[in-house]
Image (cartoon, rainbow, N blue to C red):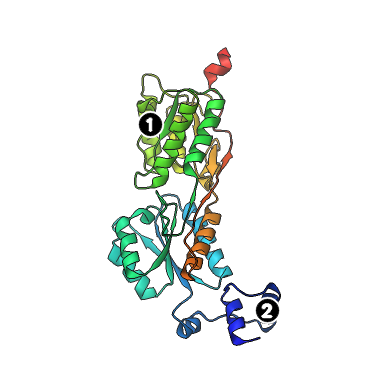
Amino acid sequence: MSIKTVSRVVNNEPNVRPQTRERVLAAVAELDYEPHPAARGLAGRRTFSIGLLYENPHEFSYIQRLLEGAHAACQATGHVLLLRPCTEGVTPLMVRQFARQTRVDGLLLTAPIADREDITTTLVESGIGFAQISPRAPNSAWPSVCPDDEQAGRALTDHVLSLGHRRVGFVKGDPRHGASDKRLAGHLGSLNDHGIDADPALVVDGRFDFESGKRGFEALWHLHDPPTAVIASNDDTAAGVVVAAHERGVDVPGTLAVAGFDDSPTATHTWPALTTVRQPIAAIAFRATELLIAGLSGEPARQETFECDLVTRASMAAPKRLEETG
C-alpha cells in the first residue's frame, strides 16, 4: 500500500475501495495501531478534535445522551471530543477563544446557543466550522440536525384528544429554545385539526424545569373551567405538574391526566410514570457530528430531521367524567 492510501483509510476519507480499506484495517488491528492526535495535527492543518458547546440543563440526562452520541461519532472517525459548558452570558468572543485556544477543527452548537446569531456570525467570519443541534430555523449554509418537535407535539396532543379530553392545558418551555415554540405549534395544530378552539387561558409559561411545572399546575387548576389533561413541554415540567397535583389532593390520572416530553429518566421516576415523547437524542448528536466532520472535508452542508416516538404510560387516561357518563 502507498502511504497516501493508508492515510486515507486511517483518516476515514472517501475514494478508497472497500477491499483495500478492509486490508488496511486488518493490518491496523494486527499491529494494534492507534493514530496519535497531536502527531496528526503536526502533519497537517487539522487537530482531529471537535468542540461541543452546551448550557447546563436542569435535567442532565439530555446532555448525557448528547455526549454519548457525539463521542461515539468522534470515536468512529478518529476524533477527540472537547467540552465547553456555557452560561447564558457566554459571548461570541468566548466561543472564538475556545475554538482558537483548543485548535478544534469545528464546533457542535446545541440549543439555545445554536440560535445565537451573534455567535454564528462570529464563527463564519472567523472561518470556524460548526454544526447546529436542534436549531430554531435550520440554515442551508450550515449542517444541522433536529428532532421533528412540531410533529411530535401534534402526535402527543392527538393521543390525548383520542382519549376524550377536550380541555387540555399546555405548559410552555424555555422561550430561548426553538423547541418550545415548535411543540406548542404542534399542540395547537392538533386542536385545530380536531375542530377544537384553542383557549389562550390553557397555555401558560414555563422554563423546562420542575418549579415552572408546579406554577403551571396552579395557574391552570385555578381556572373557572380547569383542564382534564395537561401537556408539559418536557418531563421535568410534567413532574412538577404531577407533584403539585398530589399536593392538592388531585388524582393523576383519574382527575387530571399529565404528559411530558423527552422520555428522560424523570419520566419513569415520577409516580405515576409519564406518558411522553422519546427523542433519539444520541442519534441526533451522532449524525450532527458526522455532518460536521464531512463538512470540514468539503462536503456540502446538509440539514436533517429525526422523527420522535410516542411512549404511553400510566399518567394518561380518559377523563373521569367521560368514563362516568359515557
Residue at mark 1: 203
Q: Can residue 247 be seen in this view?
A: no
* Side (left or right) of 50 relative to 9: left
Question: What's the residue type where badge 1 is placed?
Answer: Val
Residue 102 x %, y %: 39, 74
Residue 149 or residue 38, whichever sits in front: 149
Cα gap from disc 1 to disc 2, whole angstroms? 57 Å
* Side (left or right) of 310 relative to 131: right
Q: Is residue 279 visible?
A: yes
Q: Indicate whether 46 appears above or below 193.
A: below
Residue 322 x %, y %: 55, 17
Q: Indicate whether 161 appears above or below 82.
A: above
User: Residue 93, which numbered label?
Assistant: none
Question: What's the residue type where badge 2 is placed?
Answer: Ala
Residue 6 x %, y %: 61, 82
Q: Quadrant of residue 11?
A: bottom right
Q: Quadrant of residue 105?
A: bottom left
Dot 2 alpha-carbon crowd within 10 angstroms: few under 14, some 14 to 19, many 20 or more: few
Among all residues in the image, which is located at the extreme top?
325
> Is the Cβ of the residue at disc 1 closer than 8 Å to that at disc 2?
no
Can you say which quadrant of the picture contains the N terminus?
bottom right
What residue is shown at x 58% (from left), y 81% (from top)?
Answer: 7
Among all residues in the image, which is located at the extreme bottom?
2
Q: Is mark 2 on a helix, strand or loop?
A: helix
**Mark earlier in primary sequence (1, 2):** 2
What residue is shown at x 55% (from left), y 37% (from top)?
Answer: 275
Q: Indicate whether 294 appears above or below 54.
A: below
Residue at mark 2: 29
Residue 78 or residue 301, whichever sits in front: 301
